[in-house]
Amino acid sequence: MAEGIDGLTRLGTIADHLMPRTGGCEGCALSGTCRVCRPLAKHYQEAEAPLHSYCQHGDKKTTS
């Protein structure tokens, strides 16, 4: 509140730092730009769900 409107522009960066990529995502080449909700991804990993169901790596489409 003390920073006003200018403080709002930093909220995205703050949120990203509060959700580190750990566990099954550690070392991932996309971890710096990943937009997958980390708590949700953890549940998928614990359930041994296929990677394509929650990871950006699974979104790759092959085109010929």
Image (spheres, rainbow, N blue to C red):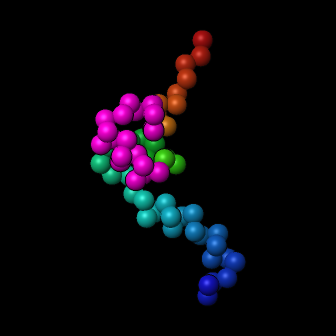
**Left or right of residue 13, residue 45 in this image:** left
Q: Tell me, yes or no, if residue 25 can be seen here.
A: no
Query: Relative to the observer, which residue lies in front, 28 or 38?
Result: 38
Identity of the residue drawn at 67% across and 82% down:
4
Q: Tell me, yes or no, if residue 47 can be seen here.
A: yes
Examine the rendered structure and indicate whether residue 52 appears above or below residue 63. below
Identity of the residue drawn at 59% across and 69% down:
10
**Left or right of residue 17, residue 23 in this image:** left
Examine the rendered structure and indicate whether residue 16 appears above or below residue 10. above
Magenta portion: prevailing SS class: helix
**Left or right of residue 43, residue 60 in this image:** right
Span colored in magenta: 37-55
| Placement of the C terminus among the 4 image quadrants | top right
Give x and y (percent) for residue 7.
63, 77
Examine the rendered structure and indicate whether residue 54 appears above or below residue 21. above
Give x and y (percent) for residue 46.
30, 42
Give x and y (percent) for residue 24.
31, 43
Identity of the residue drawn at 43% across and 64% down:
18
Give x and y (percent) for residue 5.
70, 77
Identity of the residue drawn at 49% across and 37% down:
56
